[in-house]
Amino acid sequence: MKLFKKKNYIPIGRNIPRSNTAEKSAKPEMGVDEPIIPDGMWVKCRHCGGLVYKKEMDEFEICPKCGGHFRISAKNRIKITCDEGTFEEFDADMVSKNPIGYPDYDKLIQKMQQKTEIKEAVVTGMCKINGYKTVIAVMDSNFMMASMGSVVGEKITRAIERATQMDLPIIIFTASGGARMQEGIISLMQMAKTSAAVRKHSDKGLLYVSVMTDPTTGGVSASFANLGDIILAEPKAIIGFAGRRVIEGTINEKLPDDFQSAEFQLKHGFVDKIVNRKDIKEALSVILKFHSKKEAAFNGQGF
């Protein structure tokens, strides 16, 4: 008497073709070949680890479970921040070269351009926020983690210089993994160039608001990101220079759990205020109103 039914096992590594019966049974019913659950319908929140149904999120892309802010594109950031129809882009066609001949760098840039539908990791321009005119720069972490190469540094510098020439404030939404290693020393030069432009803007008595989003690290955090007259941050954004493991290995000490978070930076005086993404437009318009020439003249104050 047989106690167990015999089973057919397929040895690992052998490429054995399926029978027609097996192929038919493997297909979903109703005669469709597409997946039952389309790709991208669910996203994982990096803050709480929960799965979020994409349609549950609105244009602000905030986790409905924990309030964590997802990383959003530059285009969407501009949409939720600027008054409709007022954004005028600067230097839209500026693209990166391959200054040190890094292997396949050109192909990587083309791939990122196709993926993000932008030419580089920052979008700059002029807009109005609740009626107040300002220059704006928005970094996009979807493009090579918004690493700062020659074009990113040049576009941000030009945006700051235009704001200086037009006597306008500038708002920069920062998000970056740091300097772009594929451009070597040229990427590091952008730290000094952008910082010098910020200084000239400041010497003219103009306003610079830095809005730190997740993540703001490396050479960007060590240059223009931390030079704002007013520094805002999104909740739970990672803000710092070197990575956590690098610092712990260097000082041979365990760092606090909330180290390099926006909340930690606020507690230690490196950030002025943490603002929810849904409130950022209103917060910026209040700052712009307070620092505008018309408002200052109305209050009998100099600018």
Image: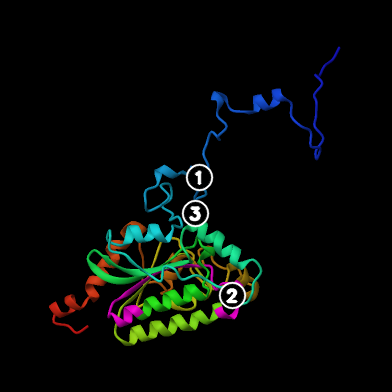
Q: Which element carries disc 3, helix, strand or loop?
A: loop
Q: Nearer the viewer, residue 198 or 15?
A: 15
Q: Amino acid at mark 2?
A: Glu
CA neighbours of label 2 inside 10 A, class few (<14), some (14 to 19), many (20+): many
- Mark nearer the N terminus (1 vs 2): 1
Magenta stretch: residue 171 in it?
yes
| Residue to which mark 2 is pinned | 183
Query: Of the residues shown, which amino acid type is indicated by label 3?
Result: His
Quadrant (top left/top right/bottom left/bottom right) for the C terminus: bottom left
Q: Is residue 226 visible?
A: no
Q: Which mark is residue 40?
A: 1
Residue under label 3, please give it: 47
User: Dividing the image into 4 quarters, which one contains the N terminus?
Assistant: top right
Q: Residues within 10 Å of mark 1 (few under 14, many from 20)?
A: few
- Residue at disc 2, secondary structure: helix
Residue bounds of the magenta highlight: 162-186
Circle nearer the N terminus (1, 3):
1
